[in-house]
Each structure stands twice: as C-alpha cells, then as structure tokens.
C-alpha cells in the first residue's frame, strides 16, 4: 500500500496508485448545492487535496474518478476555466511578496484569456480575466483559493498586518462584480477572520466549517479507517505486540478526537495517521511538523491560560465566528486544531472545547510549559517521562523529591515577585496544572481535572488513583481536608486500585515544595 505522504495533487495520487480515501460523494454534494463556500480546517488536514480534487472535477477529467463514488453521480463532466491560487509556501512577512503573488496569478490568467490594457487595479484586472475566460470558453469560471489567510497569519500582530488585510480585501472584492462570470468559488484556510475585515466587498461565502453534512470532507472517519487501513493496523499491532483492537484504541487516543459540529463525528488527523501507517511507528507527526509562528506570538502576547480555556463550554460565536486576533486567542486556538469540540449541550446550544487527542495535548502543553516555565522543551519532556514512570510504579517518595528539584530549577524570572498574592497563587496553580497535565499524557488511561478554586487533579494509572490538592503557603493537612470535604475520592471508593490522596504545599519564599503529605 502506497501512502501519499507530502502529495496533495489528486491526479498524481490516482495515476500513481496511492491510497485515496474517497470523498467524492461529498464533493458532488458540495458542487450541486451551492456556489461560493468558505471551509476552515487545521493545517495539514487535507484542504489542498480537496481543492485539487475539485480542480480535476471542474476540468472534466472523468478518467481520474473511475471507481469512485462520483462516477455514478456525475453524468455531464463539463470543462470549466479553473483559477487556482495557493498561498502556501510563501513568506508574506516580506515586503511586496503578497502583491507579487497576486500579480503573477492575474498575469497568468491574462496571458491565457486576454488582457485589458486600460485596467490598472488588481481587482479590475482579475474581474476582466474572469469575464474573458467565461466568454472564451462559454462556461463560467471556477476560483479555488488555498490557505487564503496565510498572508495575514504570517504578519499577525506586526505592522504589516493591516496592509496585507487591505491587499486581500481588494483582491477578494473582485468576486462581487464578477458574480455573473462565476460557476463556483471555494476559499479554504485555518482561521475565519472577521467578515468585515477581509470578506467585505463581495457576496459572503457560505461557511461550511461546522456544517454536519461536510464534517468528513477533510480528515479520516472511524469507518474509513476500518475500510481502507485494516492491513497497516494489523502490521502495527504485530510490531508492537498488541491485539488488533488494542492498536485501534491506541491510534484512536493518539490521532482521533476531532469534531467539527454538534453531530460529534469522530475525525482522525490524516497527516499523522498516514505517517504512522507509512513508517509503522507511532509518533507525534502533526505537532512535530512545526508549531506555527503565529501560535507562538499568540501565546506570548495573551494573558489567557490554557487551563482557563480548555474543558469549558462556549457559545459558537466565541470560537467559530468571532474575529480571530491576539486579543482573543480562543478562536485561533480552536480553528488551528489545538482545541476541538468534545461535547454539545443542545438545550443551551453550547460547545465543550478540549484537546482532541494525546498528540496535540502533549505537544501543545510542552510548548506552553517551555514558554511559561522557561526550561527547554527537551528538559521538560524528559522530566515528565520519568515522573510518569514513578506514578505508574507508585513511587511517590521519589516523585516528591523529583518534583521539588524540578520546581527549584525553574529560573527565578519565571516568578514575578511583584505580583499581588492573588496573581502569585494563580501562577503556581497554573504551574502545577501544566506539569500534571503533561505527566497525564505519558502514563494515564484516564485523565481528569477538577477545579474548585484550586488546581485539584486526579491522575489514574492501572494500579493507582492519585488525587492531588495544592496550596500556596498553606498546610498539607488543609489540602487533604479539602480533598475529603469536596468528595474528590467518592467516585473511586469501590475501585480496586489503590487511592492515594496527596496534599502539596508550595512556598512562595523557597519557590518549591515545602510540605508533602499523603493519606
């Protein structure tokens, strides 16, 4: 079986015999029901392949679709003039790159369909190209825009942001005047920026990002995993000395868990799962492929803490439709794929957001911890892996000593001594939250975080249930008493595993553990 690693061209996948998860029934539904669409998905989630498939369809390349669902749905296979602009691969933080990109795209169309020498602006010129293409071919034009938002993300929170927004706004405004020359328009990207800032000036695209009918348009569903990939799952299971069902569950925890609507259809990250099948190794492929620079800038700029964003219910307007910028990080964190829908409250029409799977949870928390606590990334991951082993073995004494030493190693400037007592306590709560959530990624089958004014954390391993309560300049007895009064242990009283209640006190003077008591 050949896997299309790094291949985003539909024709090459079909002609060279790479595995292709058939999405053409959804493609046919898409083109049959509408005209101008916007579709948001995280990076490396198959958006480019989807547009390439649309391009082949509108070029009438019937032979590429033999044996696929659309072969029995489409009868005409008409050829349309297709304009496909891809904003991937360029660095739009450099002056003039965006303008040159659009200029080259328009000039290519002018060479093919004709140029009007009296028109000067890019918007007027592109509208003329669409008109000439329609008149020359006798069919309306198709426009496909890949990663429309990259020119903005590259310059987010920099002086060039407004300039790039205005340039794109002028380019996209073409679609309004050229409406009668357009058969189909699809824009894809990671984030949905405010409509008034980028999409104003032309007919608003229909946003299908949270439409249950198109939830599986990109990504791989559980049913598709079973249909297409039984063989590599069996090979991975044999290699790791697991059963087939155990390997499916492992892959589900590592790469599944994305939901893009209230229907809660499980979607696997296609980049990670295909890389795992190709290499027969389970690694953090998606996160290792690069942390976007805009995410790093976002985390450095924002005062929001991830424990205050994850595991909470939100109205859709707060993460799907609201203007995405550094002042409001939730929309970008969600739309970039670091949080996803994990539950839906139908009565209140609110969505629960949390990490999609272990790969994203571990990678994202590691980046945050490196930025927040200051130790380098490899130092954090190494310590966390060791701490996870201590928890699995029930070695809480060694964990206590290791925990104390690790906290002592955090640079002094990570703790702002000028903060108010309330902010200082909040800082140390967040420190413990990050550390324990990271430990949980490595060793836990189930992970829960409960919050009642403190970071109260329950960590479960096959043999132990650990219930932590932290205090700043308090007493361990008070922490243990709170565990009892809050009833954190009640769900586990009939559990066969050993319950370990741990009260931990952190000293604001020594900046490490001052008291650790278990019960």
Image (cartoon, rainbow, N blue to C red):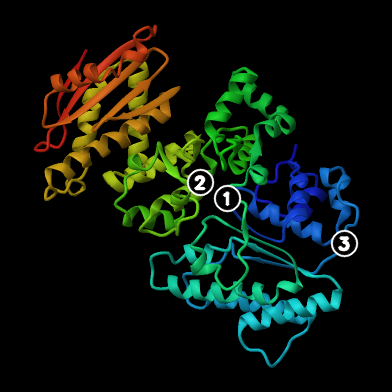
Q: Which of marks 2 and 1 is nearer the N terminus?
A: 1
Quarter-of-image position of residue 490: top left
The residue lying at 70 percent from left, 92 percent from top is 117
Answer yes or no: is residue 8 visible: no
Quarter-of-image position of residue 221: top right
Q: Earlier in the sequence, mark 3 or mark 2?
A: 3
Name the front one of labels 3 and 2: 3
Determine the CA span between mark 3 and mark 1. Answer: 29 Å
Q: Do the residues labelled 3 and 2 touch (CB within 8 Å)?
A: no
Q: Which residue is the site of mark 3?
A: 78
Numbered tag placed on residue 403 in the rendering: none
Q: Earlier in the sequence, mark 3 or mark 1?
A: 1
On screen, 396 above or below 219? above
Numbered tag placed on residue 337 in the rendering: 2
Question: Mark 2: which secondary structure?
Answer: loop
The quarter of the rendered structure image containing the N terminus is top right
The residue lying at 46 percent from left, 76 percent from top is 163
Quarter-of-image position of residue 408: top left
Instruction: Work out whether residue 55 or residue 376 is closer to the camera in this orientation and state it.
Output: 55
- Locate residue 445, reporting x and y percent: 45, 22
Tally of marks: 3
Instruction: Work out whether residue 181 or residue 121 is closer to the camera in this orientation and state it.
Output: 181
Q: Which residue is the site of mark 1?
A: 41
Determine the CA span between mark 2 and mark 1. Answer: 7 Å
Q: Do the residues labelled 2 and 1 touch (CB within 8 Å)?
A: yes
């Amino acid at each position: 079986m050949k896997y299309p690693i790094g291949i985003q061209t539909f024709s090459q996948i079909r002609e060279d015999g790479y595995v292709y998860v058939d999405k053409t029934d959804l493609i046919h539904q898409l083109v049959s029901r509408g005209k101008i669409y916007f579709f948001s998905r995280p990076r490396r989630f198959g958006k480019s392949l989807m547009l390439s498939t649309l391009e082949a369809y509108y070029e009438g390349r019937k032979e590429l679709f033999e044996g696929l669902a659309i072969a029995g749905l489409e009868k005409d296979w008409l050829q349309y003039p297709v304009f496909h602009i891809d904003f991937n691969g360029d660095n739009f933080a450099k002056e003039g790159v965006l303008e040159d990109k659009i200029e080259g795209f328009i000039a290519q169309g002018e060479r093919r369909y004709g140029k009007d020498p009296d028109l000067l602006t890019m918007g007027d010129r592109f509208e003329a190209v669409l008109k000439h293409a329609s008149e020359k071919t006798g069919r309306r034009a198709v426009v496909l825009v890949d990663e429309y938002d990259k020119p903005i993300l590259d310059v987010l929170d920099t002086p060039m942001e407004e300039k790039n927004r205005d340039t794109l706004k002028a380019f996209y405004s073409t679609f309004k005047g050229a409406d009668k020359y357009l058969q189909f328009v699809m824009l894809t990207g990671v984030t949905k920026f405010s409509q008034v800032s980028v999409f104003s000036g032309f007919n608003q695209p229909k946003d299908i990002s949270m439409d249950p009918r198109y939830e599986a348009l990109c990504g791989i569903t559980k049913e598709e995993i079973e249909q297409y990939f039984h063989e590599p799952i069996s090979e991975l299971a044999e290699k790791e000395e697991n059963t087939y069902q155990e390997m499916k569950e492992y892959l589900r925890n590592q790469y599944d868990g994305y939901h893009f609507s209230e229907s809660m259809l499980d979607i696997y990250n296609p980049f990670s799962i295909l890389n795992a099948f190709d290499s027969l190794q389970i690694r953090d492929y998606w996160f290792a492929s690069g942390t976007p620079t805009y995410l790093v800038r976002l985390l450095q700029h924002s005062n929001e803490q991830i424990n205050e964003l994850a595991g909470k219910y939100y109205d859709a307007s707060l993460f799907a439709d609201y203007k995405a910028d550094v002042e409001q990080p939730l929309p970008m964190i969600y739309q970039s794929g670091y949080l996803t829908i994990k539950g839906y409250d139908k009565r209140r029409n609110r969505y629960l957001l949390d990490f999609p799977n272990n790969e994203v949870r571990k990678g994202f928390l590691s980046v945050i911890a490196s930025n927040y606590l200051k130790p380098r990334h490899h130092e954090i991951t190494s310590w966390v892996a060791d701490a996870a082993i201590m928890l699995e073995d029930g070695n809480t004494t060694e964990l206590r000593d290791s925990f104390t030493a690790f906290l002592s190693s955090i640079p002094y400037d990570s703790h702002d001594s000028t903060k108010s007592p309330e902010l200082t306590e909040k800082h140390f709560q967040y420190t413990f939250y990050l550390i324990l959530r990271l430990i949980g990624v490595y060793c836990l089958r189930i992970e829960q975080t409960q919050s009642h004014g403190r970071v109260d954390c329950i960590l479960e391993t096959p043999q132990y249930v650990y219930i932590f309560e932290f205090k700043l300049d308090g007493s361990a007895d008070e922490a243990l008493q709170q565990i009892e009064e809050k009833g954190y242990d009640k769900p586990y009283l009939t559990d066969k595993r050993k319950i370990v209640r741990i009260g931990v006190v952190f000293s604001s003077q020594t900046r490490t553990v001052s008291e650790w008591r278990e019960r």
